[in-house]
Amino acid sequence: MTTDLARDLLTDGFERIRDGLPRVVEGLSVDELLWRPDADANHVAWLLWHLARQQDDQAAALAEADSAWRADGWFDRFGLPYPPEAHGWSMSSGDVGRFTVADPGFFAGYHAAVHERTVRYLASLDAAAYARVIDTRWDPPVTVGARLISVLDDAAKHLGQAEYVKGLITRRRP
């Protein structure tokens, strides 16, 4: 696979996440964004935030850059009851329940900033960069290319989960 093809495929995948995220938020009230199918389930708002946070943190680490969450002021705008380094991994049901939504438009805005940083990073990569080993704790060791696929896979899963919960919400309406 050529470097250009790898970049084009990854960019296309991340663009699909960017394009799908606002459609999930569209038409949902704040109460609906925070609705949980059961007491331990994640709600749409948390899923979309976590989707963006994991992409932001991992792409920033690969690029050896600051995250949009901190550098672009999204941590302050969201005003969540979590420390700035929180990204959703290992959060309890209670942590998810404390999530608040100041402005539903923040989800698309934050993810758009993350997406811009991600594709800028992708544009900087050459073949050697994709093959660079970044984590030797796994067998086989994790490369930049493998990590990018993992980030995209995680984002796609969370987008699908959020779409599913939105479907449950819309079916509950009178």
Image (spheres, helix red, strand yellow):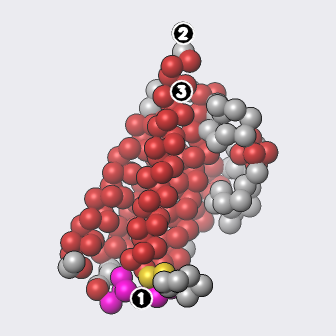
The residue under label 3 is: 168
Q: Position of residue 51 (x, y in %)?
A: 53, 54
Q: Earlier in the sequence, mark 2 or mark 3?
A: 3
Q: Considering only vertical position in the picture, is 51 above or below 63?
A: above
- Residue 86 on the magenta span: no
Q: Earlier in the sequence, mark 1 or mark 2?
A: 1
Which residue is rendered at x = 55% and y = 62% of the image? 54
Q: Who is closer to the viewer here, 16 or 41?
A: 41
In which quadrant of the rendered image does the N terminus lie? bottom left
Assess whether mark 3 and mark 1 are in contact (beta carbons under 8 angstroms): no
**Alpha-carbon neighbours of circle 3 within 10 Å: few (<14), some, or many (≥20)?**
some
Which residue is rendered at x = 41% and y = 68% of the image? 149
**Alpha-carbon neighbours of circle 2 within 10 Å: few (<14), some, or many (≥20)?**
few
Q: Considering only vertical position in the picture, is 32 above or below 9?
A: above
Which residue is rendered at x = 40% and y = 37% of the image? 23
Instruction: Point out which mark residue 132 bears.
Output: 1
Which residue is rendered at x = 72% and y = 40% of the image? 40
- The amino acid beneath tag 1 is Arg
The residue under label 2 is: 174
- Read off the magenta span: 128-135
* Distance CA(mark 1)–CA(mark 3): 42 Å
- The amino acid beneath tag 3 is Leu
Tell me if 148 is positioned left or right of 4 in this view: right
Which quadrant of the view contains residue 135?
bottom right
**Alpha-carbon neighbours of circle 1 within 10 Å: few (<14), some, or many (≥20)?**
some
Q: Earlier in the sequence, mark 1 or mark 3?
A: 1
In which quadrant of the rendered image does the C terminus lie? top right
